[in-house]
Structures are given as C-alpha cells and as structure tokens.
Amino acid sequence: MELFNEKLTKFVQISNWIQAIYEGVKILVENKIATFDLEKAIIEQTKKFGAYYVLEEGVALLHAPVGNYCLKVGVSILVLDKMIVFNNQSDKKAKIIFTLSAPNADDHIYLIKEFATFFGNSSFKKEIYAANSITEFYKIIKKYKGLKNEN
C-alpha cells in the first residue's frame, strides 16, 4: 500500500475544484482502483461539510466515506501549476491534490497516517510545493522516504 505512486501522479493545469475532483478520480478509475461514484461522493461531502479536506494552504486530501466506489486501495496525486480555491472558500486553496480510494476503514486510516508522516514535516512541504516536474516531485519523495525509514 503506497501513498505515492508515480503511475498515479500527474502535473496538470486545472482552473477549478470540480475539475480537480474529476481528474483525481479519473486516474483511479483508469487504473481500476475506484468508480466515478467516488467523485459524486466527494462532491456530496463538500456540499454538506465544505472543503474540510484542504488541510492547510497548498494541500488537499480528497476522500469520501468508505463505499462500493472504492474497488482497491490507491491514491492519485495531481500537482497543479497554481493554487485553486475549493468550494468558493477563499481560505481553502491547494496546489497538490491527493484523491484517496480506501475500501475499508483500516486502509483509510493507514493512508492518512502515511500522509501525515510526510506533510507533518515543514522541510518536506517547502520542497514538494516547489517541485516543477514529476521527476523532481519523486526525487523529493525518495529523499524523505529514506529519512523516514531511518527513524
């Protein structure tokens, strides 16, 4: 179970949050990890609770309650050319968007813990937000994965 998978990562130009949700889920659908019902579930959650998944300026962790739309465990990653605002909430901006598919609660919790391991590190965040290519993005991931394994 990997949080970061180069095959599921894209650098893209996107202008709005609905498109970001669609593109993140589309990667999962193309890899038989989720169905497009995940997109609907994320949008429904956003309508109910707002863009709670934008954890801090720069990063969003899109997810929905465990459901049949999650076929396998997986995470797509979109790295945008610029920040976008989610749900017209000016304080909810992101440039790196993770979309989670977790068929059960244990997988869901594992992925969130793994995410926190990386994004809890201010040096990692500074470097990853500055990445300009998938190659550079994964070079930074590998560097910090090595540091994580040393602990």
Image (cartoon, rainbow, N blue to C red):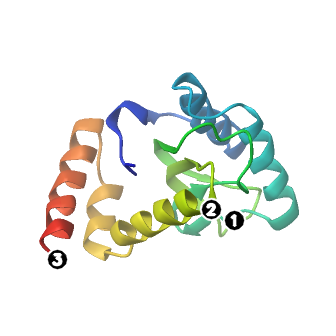
Specify whether 77 is left or right of 139: right
- Residue 97 as seen in the image, left or right of residue 52: left
Which labelled disc corresponds to residue 105?
2
Q: Which circle marks residue 14 in the picture? A: none
Looking at the picture, tell me which residue is in the foreground, 139 or 32.
32
Front tag of 1 and 3: 3
Image quarter for residue 26? top right
Q: Nearer the viewer, residue 122 or 37?
A: 37
Q: Is residue 60 visible?
A: no
Above or below 133: residue 3: below
**Is label 2 or label 3 in front?**
2
Q: Amino acid at mark 1?
A: Ser
The alpha-carbon separation of the residues under discs 2 and 3 comes to 26 Å
Q: Is residue 96 above or below residue 15?
A: below
| Quarter occupied by residue 118 | bottom left
Residues tagged 2 and 3 counted as in contact (Cβ below 8 A): no
Q: Earlier in the sequence, mark 2 or mark 3?
A: 2
Q: Position of residue 128 (x, y in %)?
A: 31, 57
Which amino acid type corresponds to the residue marked 2 in the rendered image? Answer: Ala
Residue 94 image point, x, y percent:
54, 57
Look at mark 1 in the image and give the residue it sits on. Answer: 90
Q: Residues within 10 Å of mark 2 (few under 14, many from 20)?
A: few
Depicted 87 relative to depicted 49: above or below: above
Secondary structure beneath dot 2 equals helix
Residue for badge 3: 151
